[in-house]
Amino acid sequence: MTDETASAEDGGRVRRRRRTREDVVQRICDAARQLFAERGYGGTTTREIARLADVSETLLFRYYRDKAGLFNEVVIAPFHTLMADFVELHPDPTAPFPRQAETRRFTRQVYELFEGNEAMFRALLAGPPSAGEDAAPGLRGLAPFFEQSVDQVRRRYALAEIDPPFDLGIGVRLGFGMIAASVILRDALFPDPPGREAVLDVLEQLIAQSLVGPPLD
């Protein structure tokens, strides 16, 4: 299936080479990330995103309905994909699995999401909030991500017959916040930045219990 077309020169005539749907989607998402990073959510329009992506605004709306839908695609959906992958690998959260290794892997993946989109998250989280109909959706769309994380941890504590030492909902969110802060607030937190792996090592230790729960025999 193909969609939007691109120009190409052929013997003095301009022909239009058809783009794949995947190419169009990638162009739109890349343009949205770039403009969200440069101008924030409120300062970015769908017309500007479409222009940078070299697609029609109508096509953008066909795929994402509105700017909020596009925000969900580039900001929120990747976290849900990570969780879906984790659950697919471990469909039974009460079954034994290599706890430390899996905690490290998941922590690293979340860290890399922030790291790979640092400028965008800085603009979205640290910039002034937009108002009215163009208000930034924020990270409310992450609620299912947090709820699924908490559910997995809670079930492991229940099977181990251990009472959680803290509120798991708060613990999971603070673990996520620590990962985000270690990237977005890196310069403020670390005047003399430690190595990347050193940060990840500490993060893994700090969030292991809240993210995965107690070890099971």
Image: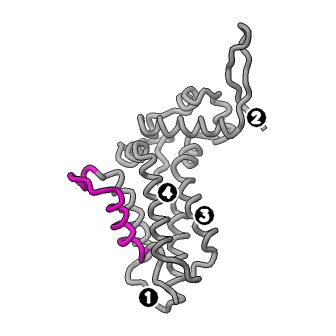
Q: Amino acid at mark 4?
A: Arg
| Mark 3 secondary-structure assignment | helix
In this view, the mark in front (2 or 1): 2
The reply to whether the C-beta atoms of the residues labelled 1 and 3 are less than 8 Å apart is no
- The x and y percentages for residue 138 are 46, 51
Is-magenta flag for residue 188?
A: yes
Q: Residues within 10 Å of mark 3 (few under 14, many from 20)?
A: few
Q: Secondary structure at mark 2?
A: strand
Asked if residue 102 is among those painted magenta in the image, a careful observer would answer no
Tell which residue pokes out farthest to the bottom in this image.
161
- What secondary structure is found at the residue carrying circle 1? loop
The label on residue 163 is 1
Q: Which residues are magenta?
A: 187-210
Q: Secondary structure beneath disc 4?
A: helix
Q: CA distance from mark 4 to mark 2?
A: 33 Å
Counting the numbered discs, the total is 4
CA separation, marks 3 and 4? Answer: 21 Å
Foreground mark, 1 or 3, reads 3
Tell me the residue that label 3 is attached to. Answer: 85
**Circle 4: is it few (<14), some (14-19), or many (20+) Cα within 10 Å?**
few
Disc 2 from disc 3: Cα separation: 28 Å
Label 1, label 3: how far apart the Cα atoms are: 28 Å
- Label 2 is placed on what type of residue? Thr
> CA separation, marks 1 and 4?
28 Å
Disc nearer the start of the sequence (4/2): 2
- Upstream in the sequence, badge 2 or badge 3? 2
Residue receiving disc 2: 2
Name the mark nearer the viewer: 4 or 2. 2
Picture residue at 56% right of the left edge, 83% below the top: 96
* Residue indicated by mark 4: 140
Residue 38 drawn at (x, y percent): 41, 35
Residue for point 68% across, 40% down:
22
